[in-house]
Image (tube, rainbow, N blue to C red):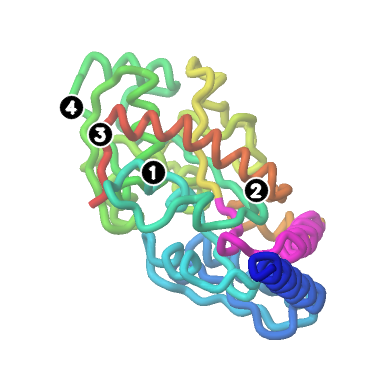
Amino acid sequence: MFLSRIAVWMSALGLTISCAGMVAAQVYPSKTIRIVAHGAGGAGDITARMIAKGLSASLGQEVTVDNRGTGVIPGGIVARAAPDGYTLLVAGTVIWLTQFMREDPPFLPFKDFSPISLLVTTPNILVVHPSLPVKSVKEFIALAKNRPGELNYASTGTGSSLHLAGALFEAMTGVNMVRVAYRRSAEAFTDLMSGRVQVMFPTAPPALPYIKSGKMRALAIGSAEPSALAPGLVTMAASGLPGYEAESILGMFAPAGTPATIINRLNQETVRFLNRADVKERLLNVGLEMVGSSPEQFAGKIRSEMARMGKVIRDAGIRAD
C-alpha cells in the first residue's frame, strides 16, 4: 500500500511538472530574450542582431544581443543557462568541432544544446598573391607539389574556418604548405597583400573587396555550388577537387532540454524572417547567404560536418591552443 501511494505521488508530481512546462511554453515569451554571440562586428554579431530585430517584431518581446568574446566562451554561457528559451546562442563550428580538438571539451553539441535553425553560410575562397604564377586550382596544386613546404598560407586561430579550409585542402591534394597563424584576419590580409605569405582561404565578406581591386587573385570558391556572392568564380569541386566544401556556418541554439514547443516557435519565426526578400538582400550585401532550416535539418548538417571535418582534424593532429 505504501509503495503504491508513492507511485501515485510520483505520477502526480510528474504530471504537475509536465503541465507546468506546457503552460510555460504556451505563454512564451513573457520577458526579454537574450542572444549570446561572439564579439561585435563579425558575421556572428551581424547575424545575431538581424535575427534579434526580426524576433522582437514577431514575438512581441525585446530580444537583445550579448557579445561575449570569442572561442568557446559564448557556448559555455548558453550550455549552463536555464532551458526556458530566454537564453539563445548564435555560433558556428566551434560548437560541434571543439570536441575533436580538446581532451576535455567544455560542451558537446547534442548533450548541451538544442539546434533551432541553420541561419546563414559564407564560403571560403582560395586566394593567392598576384605574383604567384597560377590562375587555376590545378596550376596551384602543381606549383605547391613542386615546392613542398615553401608556400605559406595565412590563417586565423586554431580550428577557425580559415585554418580548417586550408587543412582540408592539404588533406585532399597532398600538398605540404606552412600555416602561419594570425590573431586577426586583418593582419593576415596585410601580409598576403605584401607577399609575406602567398596563400589564404578567407571567407567571402572581407576578401571580396581585395579581390575586386586586384590586390589578391581568387582561384575558386569553397561552396558546393556557384555563389551569388562571387558571380563567375568556379567552385573548388568543379576545379578538380570533387567533394571539397569549405564554408563558415552560423546557426541558432538553445540549451538542451528546452521544450519542443519553444524550439518550434523560435524556428518558425526565424525561418519566416530569413525568407523575406529584403532580409535575403541585406544578408547578401554583407557577404552572407541565407539558409533557414528545420531543427532536424540543422542537426543532420552538424552530424555530417562532425564526421567529415572530425576526420580532417584527427588526421592532421589539430589541437586547440
Residue 138 relative to residue 188: left or right: right
Residue placed at 63% from the left, 37% from the top? 227
**Residue 308 versus residue 51 in the image, above or below:** above
The amino acid sitting under disc 4 is Glu
Q: With 162 as the anchor, is 176 left or right in this view?
A: left
Instruction: Judge from the rendering whether residue 218 lies leftward or rightward of residue 198; answer left or right.
Output: right
Q: Is the residue marked by circle 3 packed among few (<14), some (14-19), or many (20+) residues within 10 Å?
A: few
- The question of residue 260 being in magenta is answered with yes
Tell me where residue 75 appears, x and y as whole percent: 45, 62
Q: Nearer the viewer, residue 232 or 86?
A: 86
The quadrant holding residue 167 is top left
- Tag 3: amino acid: Gly
The residue lying toward the viewer, choosing from 178 and 215, is 178
Please tell me whether mark 2 sits on a helix, a strand or a loop: strand
Residue in the image at 57% along x and 26% along y:
234
Q: Residues within 10 Å of mark 2 (few under 14, many from 20)?
A: many
Give the foreground label among 2 and 4.
Answer: 2
- Residue occupied by mark 4: 150
Q: Is residue 9 above or below residue 232?
A: below
What is the residue that sits farthest to the front in this orientation? 1
**Image side of residue 201 versus residue 240, left or right:** left
Label 2 and label 1: CA atoms lie apart by 18 Å
Q: Position of residue 239 (x, y in %)?
A: 51, 19
Rendered residue at 26%/52% (across/down): 182
From the image, tell me which residue sits under label 3. 317
Mark with earlier residue (2, 4): 4
Q: Which mark is residue 289?
A: 2
Instruction: Tell which circle, 2 or 1, labels the residue nearer the N-terminal end.
Output: 1
Whether tag 3 and tag 4 are in contact, CB under 8 A, the answer is no
